[in-house]
Amino acid sequence: MPSCLRFGRQSGWQSGWQSAWQSTPASAIGRALNAKHAICTSIHLQRRPMSRPASQTSSSPSSSSPSKPSSNVEFLYGANVVVPALEHGRRRFVRLYIKEDERFGRLRMRGDGEAVLSGRIAAGVNLSSIEHENRGLMDLAVSLANGREVPVKEAPTSQLDRLSGGRPHQGMVLATLPPRVLGLTHLGNCDLDGVDGQVDEAEHATETLGRRYEIGTTSGNHKRMRVLGSRRYPVWLMLDQIVDPQNLGAILRSAYFFGIDGVVVTERESAPFSPVSSKASAGAMEAMDLYSAANVTKFLQESALNGWQILGTDINARQRDCVHLDLVKYLPDTLSEESDSSALASPTSDTLQQDRGSPSSSRPHILRIGNAPTILVLGNEGRGMRQSVSRQCHAHVLIRQGVERRDDGRSRLDSLNVSVAAGILLHELLINT
């Protein structure tokens, strides 16, 4: 029978291959098959998934599975954000990306499953002090990630640049879920004398104990708080529609530095607590509880009814409702009997339409910071405080301009950046008084 009937029609390359095969010595064919087997075995081993140590497969409240990252994963970048985030552990972490660089040593896995930098330094490379510092920061970040069982992966610079949006990352990017933001409805009464039975005698003996208060959440629960530092009363910041993430971060940085008890932002039309804001805060955002309020007007009203004095920063407020910052130190420690104490109890009452206190008073009757629970309100970068919010304030604290300049009919620069104003206000209100 003809070969074409037994095997079907053969193409040109098939017949050529068959003739070449038949003319090739058996020893050469054997060597080729052995080489092919070796190559296939090597590829199989390289593609074989690495088994994860038990220490990395265990579940942790601060880490999530990196195999299926959530669609809302954020990427924190830079040592001054990544390190505080890993230290405080207020987020759920996905993975830490470390720059792949032979100068600092390649990443390796120890027997216990921890990732470490091998410490191999390429010969002839002169490391600067900055590079030595980066090496130490990367070692610290990897160590903190190990402690929280966060997977660590080396990545080329191009990938880190992409994850950080082209912003400076210092060789490390941390993939995380967004931070938790607690919705608030009001700030509650301050309990200066009440100390619950759960506090031991050592704590009760300290001067800072007993200064407690509650905050109301949108879920209907109340969270018990304690005044930070040595102040007698808490001080909070209310940010009315701050839309620039750089400003938000800078304000959070100042608030953390000066020991503010809490910062509340508007739920809508406000800059998010994003990686950009965290970077601008130099990592302070990663060490703070974050709060928001859906209805700022109602939030301030209910807080005022609980005894909080509300200080605004509206430059368009009535003059009799304003006090210059350099005069705050002369505010009284307590309200006199002749003054209208109800001015602090209800800022929405009719007292807002008339002078507070005695007719001879030239200042609004408010107390110095630290002698009453206080909320300081900062307005939007462009339009300032909304009128509905400004009307809830017992008084407005203004920064006096040093020299009034006029640019020969051109536009005047007569205002401060809101984050700069926040730093000045907090220093003068909390330190100089």
Image: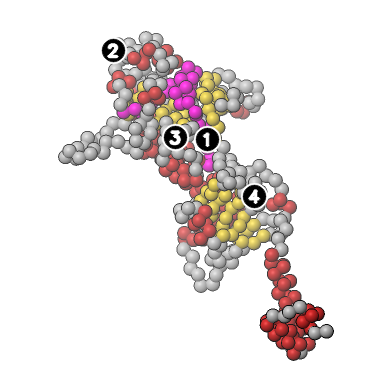
Mark pair 2, 4: CA separation: 69 Å
**Residue nearest the viewer, comparing 112 with 195:** 112
Q: Earlier in the sequence, mark 2 or mark 1?
A: 1
Element type at mark 2: loop
Q: Amino acid at mark 3?
A: Glu
Q: Give the Cα separation between the discs numbered 4 and 1.
A: 27 Å
Which numbered disc, 4 or 1, marks the residue that appears first in the sequence? 4
Observer-nearest of 419 and 371:
419
Instruction: Mark 4 vs mark 1: give the one in front.
Output: 4
Mark identifier at residue 269: 3
Q: Residue at x 59, y 59 (%)?
A: 154
- At a point 48% along the width and 53% down the height, the residue shown is 165
Region in magenta: 286-315
Circles 3 and 1: CB atoms closer than 8 Å: no
Q: What is the CA distance from the residue labelled 3 to the residue labelled 1?
A: 16 Å
Circle 4 crowding by C-alpha within 10 Å: few under 14, some 14–19, many from 20: few
Specify whether residue 37 is painted magenta.
Answer: no
Mark 2 closeness class: few <14, some 14–19, many ≥20 residues within 10 Å:
few
Sequence-earlier tag: 4 or 3: 4
Decide which of 114, 326 is in the foreground and name it.
Answer: 114
Closer to the N terminus: mark 3 or mark 2? 3
Give the amino acid type for the residue marked by disc 4 in the picture. Answer: Lys
Circle 1 residue: 290
Classify 170 as above or below 257. Answer: below
Within 10 Å of disc 1 (Cα), the crowding (few <14, some 14-19, many 20+) is some
Could you tell which of marks 3 and 1 lies nearer the N-terminus? 3
